[in-house]
């Protein structure tokens, strides 16, 4: 039976958007706790074990969330410490982000952290030095490659199925985000804004087609997509146009995400990304 990867990028919407507005790091909102409780209960309901890529900034402020994820049988993985884009970091800063997030999460979770997802999928190229740095830091797999063209974070010529990647520092398993082949073109179906645009019956059909073709898919979600509140930052519209755009984009069709996730839980055999990486011959 084909297995598919299910993952969550655990970060606080208010905190990240606030950082974009004025660069200062505020306390995470309490909304992230409520959303995580909802997500963990949903996973229990379907007996699904998932991977949670936790941001170091959030882990530091809310250590109990990391312990809850681990105690309920899920995988804890790294989403860096600060959410700075990987391609903008010096080699020393990148090494520190990987090392510090790994150690912090391992101490909190009591489990080895072997997976990484770059903030905003910011690896950009298959020869990115990030992959060798991951091997050097002791990671076994990465899930930052979006194999689609014309997106700010995509790598158009990347394989779309999980693969072993040779780096100067060793072999890393790469788990690209899910796409659907449409003729010569590939459309993203993994999560995020484009996923919210897709009606649940279409997600169900696309996932079922991949499953029948034995193509493993990797999905991702965020806690904020499970909030029942309107995502909003006071003054955000006026203070920064980009933030105004994010408020509009991230609230759009947010209510559809839980239904689509439930459909995936019902139809597919979903596993942690560590387990999915274990199916790839190195
Ligand atoms: Zn993120």
Image: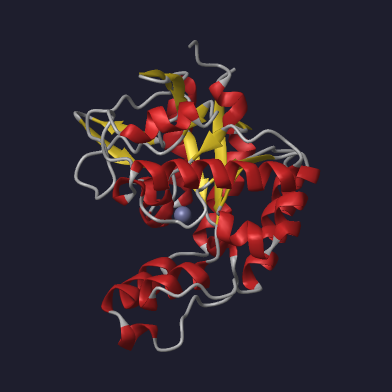
Residue 205: image x %, image y %? 44, 37
x 65%, y 48%: residue: 104
Q: Is residue 199 left or right of residue 153?
A: right
Q: Is residue 15 left or right of residue 250?
A: right
x 40%, y 56%: residue: 84
Residue 116: image x %, image y %? 50, 38
Q: How is the image coloured?
A: secondary structure
Q: Quadrant of the rendered structure where residue 164 is?
A: top left
Residue extending farthest right: 71
Q: Between residues 82 and 281, which one lies in front from this camera angle?
A: 82
Residue 256 vertical position relative to residue 2 in the rendered view, above or below = below
x 41%, y 48%: residue: 93
x 37%, y 35%: residue: 130
Residue 254 vertical position relative to residue 117 in the rendered view, above or below = below
Residue 36: image x %, image y %? 67, 59
Q: Total number of numbered labels?
A: 0
Residue 39: image x %, image y %? 67, 54
Q: Between residues 121 and 251, which one lies in front from this camera angle?
A: 121
Residue extending farthest front: 92
Q: Is residue 170 visible?
A: yes
Residue 232 vertical position relative to residue 173 in the rendered view, above or below = below
Q: Is residue 189 visible?
A: no
């Amino acid at each position: 039976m084909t297995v598919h990867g299910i993952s969550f990028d655990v970060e606080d919407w208010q905190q990240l958007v606030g950082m974009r507005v004025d660069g200062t790091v505020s306390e995470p909102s309490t909304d992230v706790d409520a959303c995580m409780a909802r997500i963990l209960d949903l996973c229990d309901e379907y007996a699904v074990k998932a991977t949670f890529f936790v941001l170091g900034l959030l882990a530091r402020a809310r250590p109990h969330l990391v312990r809850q994820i681990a105690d309920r049988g899920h995988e804890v993985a790294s989403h860096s410490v600060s959410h700075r884009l990987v391609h903008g970091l010096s080699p020393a800063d990148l090494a520190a982000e990987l090392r510090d997030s790994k150690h912090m999460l391992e101490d909190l979770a009591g489990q080895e952290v072997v997976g990484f997802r770059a903030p905003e999928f910011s690896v950009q190229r298959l020869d990115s030095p990030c992959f060798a740095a991951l091997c050097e830091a002791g990671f076994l797999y990465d899930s930052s490659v979006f194999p689609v063209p014309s997106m700010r974070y995509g790598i158009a010529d990347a394989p779309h199925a999980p693969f072993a990647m040779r780096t100067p520092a060793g072999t890393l398993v790469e788990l690209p985000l899910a796409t659907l082949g449409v003729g010569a073109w590939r459309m993203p179906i993994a999560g995020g804004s484009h996923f919210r645009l897709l009606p649940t019956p279409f997600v169900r059909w696309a996932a079922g087609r991949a499953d029948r073709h034995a193509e493993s898919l990797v999905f991702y979600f965020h806690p904020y997509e499970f909030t029942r509140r309107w995502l909003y930052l006071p003054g955000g519209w006026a203070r920064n146009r980009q933030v105004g755009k994010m408020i509009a984009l991230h609230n759009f069709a947010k209510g559809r995400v839980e239904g689509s996730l439930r459909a995936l839980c019902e139809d597919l055999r979903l596993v942690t990304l560590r387990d999915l990486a274990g199916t790839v011959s190195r």
